Image (cartoon, helix red, strand yellow):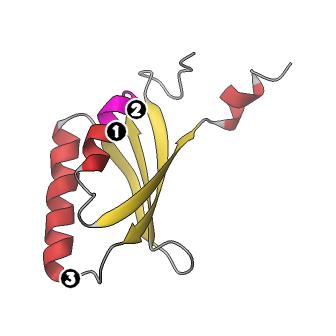
């Protein structure tokens, strides 16, 4: 069952990132290109953060569906390993509680 997460019936995804190798300026430039390409396909980046600890970064993005997000995420495979979670706003999740 698809639950509308925001107006426009788009889904929110949280992706935990681990670098496959040390980041370089070239990596950052390629990363920017991948973000721009995803944006032309209807994916919106809500936040991108580098982290200290178990993961190197987190991406917060919005997409019409999981297939579109997966298509964009696959492109990052040479640079990072990803673990993606679907985020459901608390208000929407609370409606499912019986």
Marks 3/2 in contact by CB < 8 Å: the verdict is: no
Marks 1/2 in contact by CB < 8 Å: the verdict is: yes
Of callouts 3 and 2, the N-terminal one: 3
Q: CA distance from mark 3 to mark 2?
A: 29 Å
How crowded pointer 1 is (Cα within 10 Å; few <14, some 14-19, many 20+) is rated as many
- Looking at the picture, does residue 83 appear above or below residue 20? above
66 magenta-colored: yes
What secondary structure prevails in the magenta region? Answer: helix
* Label 2 sits on residue: 66
* Label 1 sits on residue: 69
Q: Is residue 31 left or right of residue 9?
A: left
Range shown magenta: 64-69
Name the residue: 21% across, 63% down: 31
* Label 3 sits on residue: 24
Q: CA distance from mark 1 to mark 2?
A: 5 Å
Q: Is residue 30 left or right of residue 20?
A: left
Name the residue: 49% across, 75% down: 51
Q: Quadrant of residue 26?
A: bottom left
Q: Quadrant of residue 39?
A: top left
């Amino acid at each position: 069952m698809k639950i509308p997460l925001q107006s426009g019936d788009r889904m929110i995804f949280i992706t935990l990132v681990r670098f496959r190798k040390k980041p370089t300026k070239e990596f950052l430039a390629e990363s920017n290109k991948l973000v721009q390409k995803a944006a032309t396909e209807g994916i919106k980046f809500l936040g991108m953060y580098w982290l200290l600890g178990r993961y190197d970064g987190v991406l917060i993005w919005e997409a019409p569906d999981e297939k579109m997000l997966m298509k964009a995420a696959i492109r990052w495979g040479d640079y990072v390993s990803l673990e993606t979670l679907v985020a459901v706003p608390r208000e929407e999740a609370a409606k499912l509680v019986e």
